[in-house]
Image: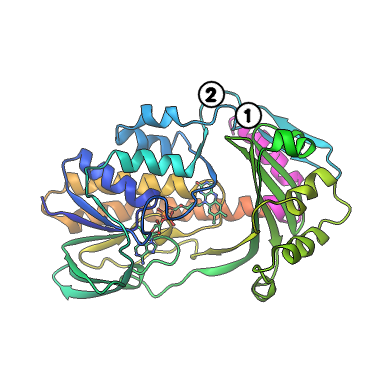
Amino acid sequence: MTPVTIIGGGLGGLMLARALHVQGIPSTIYESEASPEARTQGGQLDIHTYYGQLALADAGLTDQFRAIIHEGGAASRVLAQDGTVLLDEPDDGQDTRPEVLRGDLRRILRESLPEGTIQWGKKLASVTALGQGKHELTFTDGTRVTSDILVGADGAWSKVRPLLTDVKPAYTGTTYVETYLYDVDARHPATAAAVGDGGMFSLSPGKGISAHREAGAVLHTYVQLSCPEDWADSVDFADPVAVRTLVAAKFDGWAPELTALITDGETAPVSRKIYALPDNHRWDRVPGVTLIGDAAHLMPPAGEGANLAMFDAAELAKAIAANPGDVEAAFTAYETAMFPRSHQEAVDAQEVMDLCIGERAPFGLIEFFTQVGQGA
Ligand SMILES: Cc1cc2nc3c(=O)[nH]c(=O)nc-3n(C[C@H](O)[C@H](O)[C@H](O)COP(=O)(O)OP(=O)(O)OC[C@H]3O[C@@H](n4cnc5c(N)ncnc54)[C@H](O)[C@@H]3O)c2cc1C
């Protein structure tokens, strides 16, 4: 079997290596981070029955996945600016969209791979097409390898993508500011009570505070702001106190247990400018290379990106296994299904973003949760 060269060891790249391994196909992941511990892996992801859980089942990892579920974490509530509860939905325990920590998910995928599959500290610097589907990959440490089958799983700012398309992600008009509170039951009880067991959304047109309770008594917050990119760039994130003051001022008059998610943050606030590729991003077939996950279809965060990355990976592995010796047929089959799937999901993601901080906030999101709860 011709080995597959994967750039990027995020959820997409790791799942691809695992799914190929299950099919008996060797692969190597080149990952820019120096080691699994190089970066904190904060953030909880809800893993859906229709994409993420299907991929994990194909990969033979359902038991490992069940072991890392944050029980009760799928609860949702919407609060008014004064803290009044507008909607409160407990975790129904059905495991249709259970929450797990990204770091745990990456760990179970990593542990399922043969020794040596991941080459750490290998940041792709450039790629050159050699013809007949082969590519020469040059890493920032000066080393080079040649690929026969190349998959870009290297996220939003993919270095593989330019082989297929000139399109670059564009700023969406929204910036998230990320904060953390720790040991919240003891140290921030009013805020812990306001957030509850799962996700809490307090939203208005143009801005909102969304927090999740994560395993280990942690509150992880994204403050969502509609703002021009130059405003986001003008904020000096090297000065955490100034950032907290500036961001909190936008929520003047909101309940103190909500604004505490900004003012009492125990880590330096982090800027997450939200970028996206066009909804219908696609490319013409180029021999020997394709993309999965954010590299293929970066979209606003709406709870589907990690799920889609893993599903792309599982589908691509199946297509490669079903077309032995004919990678072009495999890539064509994968892309023919992936393009319309990600187009629809990108449109939906934009709608979810609009429900959160568009003109109808917070009532659009309440209607959405009510419809999802009724199985719409
Ligand atoms: C603020 C925010 C919140 C989100 N919340 C959710 C959520 O709740 N649920 C959800 O499903 N999705 C969420 N997402 C989206 C989700 O994080 C992504 O869709 C998902 O991580 C995509 O996986 P991936 O493997 O394609 O890319 P990534 O996770 O970005 O992984 C790419 C990997 O490639 C590596 N890499 C990058 N460049 C190179 C290079 N040149 N050479 C070698 N390696 C390289 C990176 O180090 C990384 O390990 C969120 C996104 C954001 C921004």
Assess whether residue 366 is covered by the magenta stretch: yes
Q: Position of residue 2 (x, y in %)?
A: 12, 54
Q: Amino acid at mark 1?
A: Gln
- The percent coordinates of residue 15 (x first, y second) are 33, 45
Residue 207 is one of the magenta-drawn residues: no
Amino acid type indicated by mark 2: Gln
In this view of the protein, which residue sits in the foreground, 173 or 264? 264
Farthest residue toward the right? Answer: 253
The verdict on label 2 being within 8 Å of ligand 1 is no
Q: Bounds of the magenta span?
A: 355-376
> Which residue is tagged 2?
94
Q: Are marks 1 and 2 in contact (CB under 8 Å)?
A: no
Q: Nearer the viewer, residue 316 or 221?
A: 221
Residue 361 place in picture, x, y as percent: 75, 50
The residue located at (77%, 54%) in the rendering is 263
Comparing marks 1 and 2, which lies closer to the viewer? 2
Q: Is 192 rendered above or below residue 148?
A: above
| Mark 1, other Cα within 10 Å: few <14 / some 14–19 / many ≥20 | few
Q: Quadrant of residue 238?
A: bottom right
Q: Label 2: state its secondary structure.
A: loop
- Give the alpha-carbon distance from disc 1 to disc 2, as whole Å: 14 Å
Q: Is residue 144 visible?
A: yes
Decide: few, some or many residues near mark 2? Use Cα within 10 Å; few <14, some 14-19, many ≥20: few
Which disc is residue 84 wearing? none
At numbered mark 1, what does the secondary structure look like: helix, strand or loop?
A: loop
Viewed as shown, does residue 243 lie left or right of 138?
A: right
